[in-house]
Image (cartoon, rainbow, N blue to C red):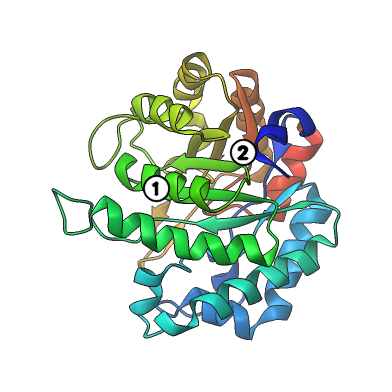
Amino acid sequence: MKREEFQTQIKFPLLLDGATGSNLMAAGMPRGVCTEIWVRDHKDVFLRLQKAYIEAGSQVIYAPTFGGNRISLSMHGLENEIEALNKTLVSYSLEAADDKVLVAGDLTTTGKMMAPAGELSYEQAFEVYQEQIHYLAEAGVDLLAVETMISIEETLAALDAALSVCDLPVMCSMTIESDGSLFTGGNIFEAALALESAGASAVGINCSVGPEQLVAIIRTLYETVSIPVIAKPNAGMPVIDDLGQAVYNMTPQDFALHMKTLVDMGASIVGGCCGTTPEFIRRMTEIL
């Protein structure tokens, strides 16, 4: 799909998938391992999850390439595995999709602070994202999802890199405080305008908070930009249990009802993040 076809060929609301990491840990993935390597070595577990999302109604599934950039992989000594990992992991999602749904190449923050607050320059970030996006495009993804970003500068670097490499649609979503502010300064409304101007196909929010806290923010985003608005929140706010693990208590039905409200407020690309499962997507599909 070409960038200019995104809004004309897609029927909205567009349903994304739900959480990946929390479901993989529930399926046995240990904490602290490289997720990309674990998924590579447990293809059957991952395919079951993605096929469950498709069966539940997801129209877009995210390839498990979230941390597949050079900086993140180098923390595991895998900087020489970038091409092989990204292409292998995309092939898993393409197999699960079976030409029935779209596959998004997934990208996120490098984890490094951008200059001047940190040492990562725009040029370095651009090159890191350009490399990964090149391999994702070669692997055959239908679109790109730049998600869980905390800095507008790094998000713009990823978007600019995507536009320099391919003509795929790019969805950009950031993680925010409950009042819409970004963790690195500024707010989601300023960021959304900047990303729209830079060529994003859709903008919005993922992770961060639960859907019940996003009503006013989604409404304002819808009034601020002219491209589709993304809402992919967590299953409510977590409670930390005695083992230090995040426990999400929102039910699939409650989540789906809140997501219906976000669609009414202007969200047209919706899914779930941390704590959500295929059942959350199923309920959302039924209600929408």
The answer to whether 70 is drawn above or below residue 214 in the figure is below
Residue lying at the far left of the rendered structure: 116
* Quarter that holds the N terminus: top right
Secondary structure at badge 2 equals helix
Q: Is residue 86 left or right of residue 286?
A: left
Residue at image location 79% in from the left, 55% down from the top: 54
Which disc number belongs to residue 255?
2
Q: Position of residue 177 (x, y in %)?
A: 33, 36
Residue lying at the far top of the rendered structure: 223
The count of marks equals 2
Circle 1 sits on which residue? 149
Residue at image location 17% in from the left, 50% down from the top: 115
Q: Reading the chain from its start, which is encountered first: label 1 or label 2?
A: 1
Residue 135 found in image quarter: bottom right
* Quarter that holds the C terminus: top right
Q: Amino acid at mark 2?
A: Phe
**Mark 1 in CB contact with mark 2 (< 8 angstroms):** no
Separation of residues labelled 1 and 2 (CA atoms):
23 Å
Q: Position of residue 18 (x, y in %)?
A: 63, 52
Residue at image location 76% in from the left, 46% down from the top: 59
Residue lying at the far front of the rendered structure: 164
